[in-house]
Image (spheres, rainbow, N blue to C red):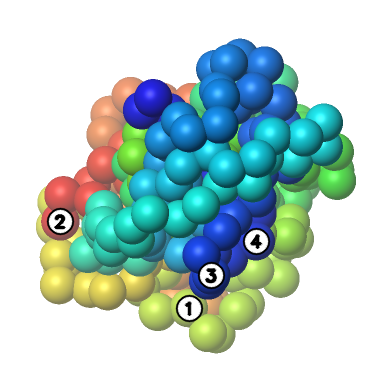
């Protein structure tokens, strides 16, 4: 059985426990039985070979057989601050950013935004990160950070290399590649307002162009994630 399962609590001892959706997937979908071996991960960067030891209605207890450190993270730590698109496009965005190795997604609250990052939406996106990580083999979860007001986020002086997607800016290929942390802001379909851009530029955010075409929010974010993973 090659399926991967996510354990909410850090795996530190000789056993681990699957609960809720993960336990149901293992027992109801995969039809696991005592003695079956599976792969677990807890978001720490490691993965674990484990054997099903006990199955109950509420949980599955597994015996840890082996721990392996498998690092699939890109060299540069990428934070994408994004004015979320509507509907299912949000989940698709999160899936692809997880696969491409983005470290963090910050939902931006902007003046022209069309989708508000409410608590229920954030919870769905965090679940989508787990599902995408299970599929792609990544052992660290992309963080879905608390939503931030765009102007307030632009004034955050704790960030290092700060990029903002804006027509007419520098091309990604012209930027220095030897950086360890990158933050890039992607605006809503109507773009950032002049007031939001003013705050960004006053705080040394560098405008970058993502090409001649007008890209959808999720396409722009994926283009930046692909570039950062290859740089």
Residue mark closest to the camera, 3 vs 2: 3
Earlier sequence position, callout 1 versus callout 3: 3
Left or right relative to 28: residue 39: left
Earlier sequence position, callout 3 versus callout 2: 3
Label 3, label 4: how far apart the Cα atoms are: 11 Å
Label 1, label 3: how far apart the Cα atoms are: 36 Å
Q: Residues within 10 Å of mark 3 (few under 14, many from 20)?
A: few
Looking at the rendering, which quadrant does residue 160 occupy?
bottom left
Left or right relative to 110: residue 198: left
Residue 231, numbered circle:
2
Q: Is residue 142 visible?
A: no
Element at label 2: loop
> What residue did someone put label 1 on?
159
The residue at the point 37 percent across, 47 percent down is: 49
Looking at the rendering, which quadrant does residue 204 occupy?
bottom left
Element at label 1: loop
Element at label 4: loop
Q: Position of residue 75 (x, y in %)?
A: 22, 64
Looking at the rendering, which quadrant does residue 96 occupy?
top left
Label 2, label 4: how far apart the Cα atoms are: 33 Å
Residue mark closest to the camera, 1 vs 4: 4
Nearest the viewer among 176 and 98 is 98
Label 3, label 2: how far apart the Cα atoms are: 38 Å
Dot 3 and dot 4 residues touching (CB under 8 Å): no
> What residue did someone put label 3 on?
13
Q: Is residue 156 visible?
A: yes
């Amino acid at each position: 059985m090659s399926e991967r399962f996510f354990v909410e609590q850090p795996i530190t001892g000789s056993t681990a426990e699957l609960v809720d959706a993960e336990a149901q997937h293992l027992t109801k979908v995969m039809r696991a039985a005592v003695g079956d071996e599976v792969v677990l991960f807890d978001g720490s960067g490691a993965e674990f070979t484990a054997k099903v030891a006990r199955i109950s209605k509420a949980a599955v207890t597994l015996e840890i057989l082996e721990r392996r450190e498998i690092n699939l993270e890109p060299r540069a730590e990428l934070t994408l601050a994004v004015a979320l698109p509507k509907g299912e496009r949000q989940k698709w965005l999160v899936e692809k950013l997880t696969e491409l190795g983005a470290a963090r997604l910050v939902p931006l609250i902007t003046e022209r935004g069309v989708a508000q990052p409410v608590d229920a939406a954030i919870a769905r996106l965090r679940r989508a990160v787990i599902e995408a990580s299970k599929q792609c083999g990544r052992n660290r979860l992309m963080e879905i950070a608390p939503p931030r007001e765009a102007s307030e986020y632009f004034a955050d002086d704790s960030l290092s290399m700060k990029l903002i997607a804006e027509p007419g800016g520098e091309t990604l290929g012209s930027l220095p590649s030897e950086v360890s942390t990158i933050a890039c802001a992607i605006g809503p379909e109507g773009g950032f307002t002049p007031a939001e851009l003013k705050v960004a530029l006053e705080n040394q955010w560098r405008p970058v162009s993502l090409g001649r075409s007008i890209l959808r929010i999720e396409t722009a974010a994926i283009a930046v994630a692909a570039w950062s993973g290859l740089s």
